[in-house]
C-alpha cells in the first residue's frame, strides 16, 4: 500500500497581493517556513520569463534563499527550462544548491511550452524539444561522471573536469511536468517523478499511464535509486472558514490568475487553452478546489481516490490572494485537511 504525501507548487505571480517584489519574495519565504513546519515534502517553483505569471525566472536564486529559511523541506524547479541554460553552468549550480540545502534539491526538467518565452530569448520553438533532449543527457552525464564528454548538434564538451559533485548520490531526483499520456510514458520510462494537472478524469489517465509504463530496471531510467516514484496531481486550493467566503475570494482571484497566465499570449494576439476563462468550469472539473475545510477535504480525497495518485500538490498562492489569505488557507489545510488525507492508503 502507498501513503499519500504532499507538495506545494508556486508560479510566484507578480500580482499576488504584494505591493512590490521584495515583499512578494519575503511573503513566499515565510510561507515556505510554514510548509516546512507542517511536513510538506517539496516546494516546486515554476520558471517563466517576460510574464507576470512568474517572478522567479531564475529559480536557483530564489531557492538559495529558501535553503536558509527551511530545514527539512525539499524544493526545486518544476521545471528548469533546459533550452534556456548552458548545461555546464547549470550542472555547477545544481551541485552548489544541493550542498547549500543539505541535499534537499529536486531537479525538474522540461523544454518550455510558450513559443513567446522561447522566442524572446532567441530559442527556436520547433527545435526546443531536440535541444531539451541533448541538454538532459549532458546534465545526467555531468552529474554522474568525474569528466564530461558529449558531442551533439547543440552541445559539445570534451573531457571537462567535473570538480563540483552533488551532495545526493548518484544525483538529486529528476522530475517532469506532464499534461498527457504520451509525455507521461516518456517520463515513466526514464523513472522520473511526475506532476500533472487538469480535470480529474484526465489526471487519472495520466497516473494510470505512468503506472503501466514504469519499470524499475528500465535501461533508460534516470532515477535507478528511486524505488517508488511520486506520481503527482496538482490542484489550485483556497480554503476559508465557509464555502461562501471561499467562493467569493476564489472567484475574484481566478480572474487575476487567468489574466496572468494569458498576458504574454494576449500580447501576441492569441491565447493558451490550458485554463479556460471559466471559474465554475475549472472548479467543476476538479482543477480548482475552493471551499471550507470539510469541502476541500472531501474534494481532495475524491481526487486521490479517482486518480490513484500518491502525491497531492497544492497551489496556495495564486491570482491576487494576499500573503495573509494564502497563509490562512494553508493553515486550515495543515490543521484540518491534511491530517485526514494522511489516513488514506492507496493500492499501488
Image (cartoon, rainbow, N blue to C red):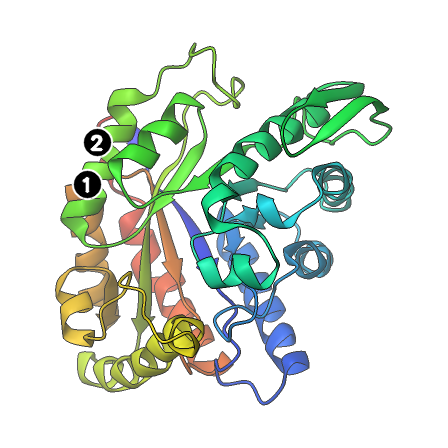
Q: Residues within 10 Å of mark 1 (few under 14, many from 20)?
A: many
Q: Which residue is mark 2?
A: 208
Q: Visible in this render: residue 10?
A: no
Looking at the image, which is closer to me, 74 or 191? 191
Mark identifier at residue 160: none
Looking at the image, which is closer to me, 333 or 220? 220
Count the marks. Answer: 2
Looking at the image, which is closer to me, 175 or 117? 117
Q: Visible in this render: residue 20?
A: yes
Up the image or down, 185 lies above or below 301; here it is above
Element carrying mark 2: helix
Q: Quadrant of residue 65?
A: bottom right
Q: Which residue is mark 1?
A: 204
Q: Residues within 10 Å of mark 2 (few under 14, many from 20)?
A: some
The quarter of the rendered structure image containing the C terminus is top left
**Residue 149 placement (x, y as % from top left):** 75, 19
The quarter of the rendered structure image containing the N terminus is top left
Up the image or down, 100 lies above or below 3; here it is below
Q: Label 2, label 1: how many angstroms apart (C-alpha)?
A: 6 Å
25 vs 321, left or right, is right
Up the image or down, 335 lies above or below 279; here it is above
149 vs 307, left or right, is right
Q: Quadrant of residue 173?
A: top right
Residue in the image at 73% along x and 45% along y = 97
**Residue 270 placement (x, y as % from top left):** 33, 71
Residue in the image at 34% along x and 55% along y = 338
Residue in the image at 34% along x and 36% along y = 183
**Residue 279 placement (x, y as % from top left):** 20, 75
| Label 2 with label 1: CB-CB less than 8 Å | yes
**Residue 177 placement (x, y as % from top left):** 41, 44
Element carrying mark 1: helix
Amino acid at each position: 500500500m502507498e501513503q499519500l504525501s504532499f507538495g506545494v507548487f508556486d508560479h510566484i505571480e507578480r500580482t499576488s497581493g504584494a505591493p512590490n517584489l521584495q515583499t512578494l519574495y519575503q511573503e513566499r519565504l515565510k510561507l515556505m517556513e510554514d510548509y516546512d513546519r507542517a511536513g510538506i515534502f517539496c516546494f516546486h517553483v515554476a520558471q517563466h520569463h517576460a510574464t507576470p505569471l512568474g517572478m522567479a525566472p531564475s529559480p536557483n536564486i530564489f531557492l538559495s534563499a529558501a535553503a536558509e529559511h527551511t530545514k527539512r523541506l525539499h524544493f526545486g524547479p518544476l521545471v528548469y527550462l533546459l533550452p534556456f541554460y548552458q548545461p555546464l553552468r547549470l550542472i555547477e549550480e545544481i551541485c552548489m544548491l544541493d550542498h547549500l540545502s543539505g541535499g534537499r534539491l529536486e531537479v525538474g526538467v522540461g523544454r518550455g511550452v510558450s513559443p513567446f518565452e522561447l522566442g524572446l530569448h532567441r530559442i527556436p520553438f520547433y527545435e526546443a524539444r531536440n535541444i531539451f533532449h541533448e541538454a538532459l543527457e549532458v546534465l545526467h552525464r555531468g552529474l554522474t561522471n568525474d569528466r564530461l564528454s558529449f558531442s551533439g548538434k547543440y552541445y559539445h564538451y570534451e573531457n571537462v573536469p567535473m570538480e563540483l559533485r552533488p551532495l545526493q548520490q548518484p544525483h538529486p531526483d529528476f522530475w517532469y511536468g506532464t499534461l498527457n499520456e504520451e509525455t507521461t510514458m516518456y517520463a515513466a520510462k526514464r523513472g522520473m517523478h511526475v506532476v500533472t494537472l487538469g480535470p480529474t478524469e484526465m489526471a487519472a489517465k495520466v497516473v494510470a499511464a505512468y503506472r503501466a509504463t514504469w519499470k524499475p530496471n528500465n535501461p533508460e531510467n534516470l532515477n535507478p535509486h528511486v524505488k517508488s516514484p511520486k506520481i503527482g496531481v496538482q490542484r489550485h486550493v483556497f480554503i476559508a472558514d465557509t464555502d461562501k467566503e471561499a467562493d467569493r475570494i476564489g472567484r475574484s482571484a481566478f480572474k487575476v490568475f487567468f489574466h496572468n497566465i494569458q498576458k504574454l499570449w494576449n500580447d501576441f494576439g492569441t491565447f493558451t487553452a490550458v485554463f479556460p476563462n471559466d471559474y465554475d468550469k475549472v472548479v467543476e472539473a476538479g482543477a480548482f478546489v475552493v471551499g471550507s475545510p470539510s469541502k476541500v477535504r472531501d474534494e481532495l480525497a475524491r481526487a486521490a481516490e479517482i486518480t490513484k495518485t500518491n502525491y497531492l500538490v497544492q497551489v496556495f498562492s495564486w491570482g491576487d490572494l494576499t500573503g495573509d489569505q494564502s497563509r490562512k488557507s494553508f493553515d486550515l489545510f495543515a490543521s484540518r485537511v491534511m491530517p485526514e488525507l494522511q489516513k488514506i492508503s492507496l493500492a499501488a
